[in-house]
Image: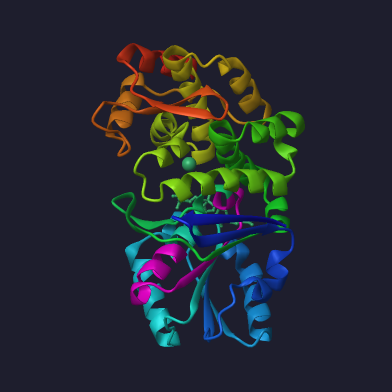
Amino acid sequence: MHRVVITEGDEPVSEILIAGGLLSDAAGYLPQREDRRQVAILTQPSVRSLADSVAESILDGGVAASVIPLPDGEAAKTLSVIEDVALALNRLGLTRADTVFGIGGGATTDTAGFVAATYLRGVECVLAPTTLLGAVDAAVGGKTGVNVGGKNLVGAFRHPSRVLVDIDVLESLPMDLRRQGTAEALKTGFVGDPDLVELYREHGIDAPLDEVVGRAIGVKARVVSEDFREGGLRAVLNYGHTAGHAVEVAAGISHGEAVAIGMVAAGAVGERTVGFDRRVEQEELIASLGLPTRSPNVHAGEIERLMALDKKRDTGGIRFVVLEDFGIPRVVHPDAATVRASLHAIGID
Ligand SMILES: NC(=O)c1ccc[n+]([C@@H]2O[C@H](COP(=O)([O-])OP(=O)(O)OC[C@H]3O[C@@H](n4cnc5c(N)ncnc54)[C@H](O)[C@@H]3O)[C@@H](O)[C@H]2O)c1
Ligand SMILES: [Zn+2]
């Protein structure tokens, strides 16, 4: 079993366990807590039966458990769903000694995390991500939230006390979900773990998930432990997201595919600004995993407008995370010609 700990100062605040079969004995893997009387499980339709079996395991362990179903995907991330869930928790009589347990993809874990951060001003949160993207990104790091007008506009920083990543569940994901998560996992390799990049080079998309997830979460945990509230370092996790997010919005493609394309653009920016000399190698690796390296047909002006709107921009203009080398990220503010060249690199003229 892999175990990763996130710290604040010297204090451990969140523990992530990664292994096959964890959810078959979910009761045994909840943090020890004498006064816990009940667990409220929030879940999404695709993993409802898994959530039901976890509830049974918790009941067998002598603690009450109820399942609160959420709508699928982004439809869960609304304030009206938060209100419904809060009303349900109130009916159940959930107290500060009890636990909210989110089981599902990133939409479920973002929603469960926000409920746990705000209900009674904060109750214990445990998360079990069931998508690869959820495991390597959404469920780890303590950012929670829902969409109000803009994406994730209302939220809170609060760590889950424990994250249970059941590798058996991730093994059974359909290929498109696996690919989406692979883009984010590879991203963490590029910014923080060259061995993870090697693992993908050696095994392709079938790289062993326990090691992929352990390494990817290891990178995120290290970054978040140093910079929980996005003072600076945490920005490196946005590698591929400046152009990627703009392409996602303009072309309406999935987040993972957009990040893959965005990393190709960032490679070109890195080449021109900090002498990154592995642009071609990076692009070949991304392509070899079945991820796109070129944007669908969109207008350069539209992409530039979206990049300038990006909330992650700062006063120096459009901000890109780039690599000096695999594992050595830098933040730069490229000039207009460099931005154009990076769009050219992803097929936008
Ligand atoms: N909090 C953070 O730091 C953070 C980071 C990255 C992404 N996110 C959020 O995560 C969300 C995206 O995550 P996601 O792609 O996991 O979204 P998701 O929860 O919408 O899941 C994607 C789809 O996969 C299905 N699914 C889930 N588990 C499955 C399984 N085991 N087998 C088959 N299907 C399954 C879901 O029902 C859904 O239809 C976005 O809302 C994004 O904002 C948050
Ligand atoms: Zn992302």
The quadrant in which residue 83 appears is: bottom left
Q: Residue at x 47, y 53 (%)?
A: 141
Q: Is residue 117 magenta?
A: yes
Q: Name the residue furthest front.
A: 10
Q: Position of residue 70 (x, y in %)?
A: 48, 67
Residue 97: x, y in percent? 46, 82
Total count of labels: 0
- Give the residue at x 56% y 17%: 279
Q: Position of residue 5 (x, y in %)?
A: 57, 56
Residue lying furthest left: 315
Residue sitting at x 50%, y 24%: 323
What colouring does the structure picture have? Answer: rainbow
* Front position in the image: 10 or 65: 10
Rendered view: 197 above or below 23? above
Viewer-closest of 339 and 329: 329
The quadrant of the image that shows the C terminus is: top left
Quadrant (top left/top right/bottom left/bottom right) for the N terminus: bottom right
Asked whether residue 228 appears in the rendered view, the answer is yes
Left or right: 145, with 48 as reference point: left
Indicate yes or no whether the magenta region holds residue 226.
no
Task: Give the magenta part as a residue range.
Answer: 112-135
Where does the image place residue 302, in percent across and percent down from the top left? 32, 26
Placement of 238 over or under 106, stated as above or below: above
Is residue 252 something that shows in the picture? Answer: no
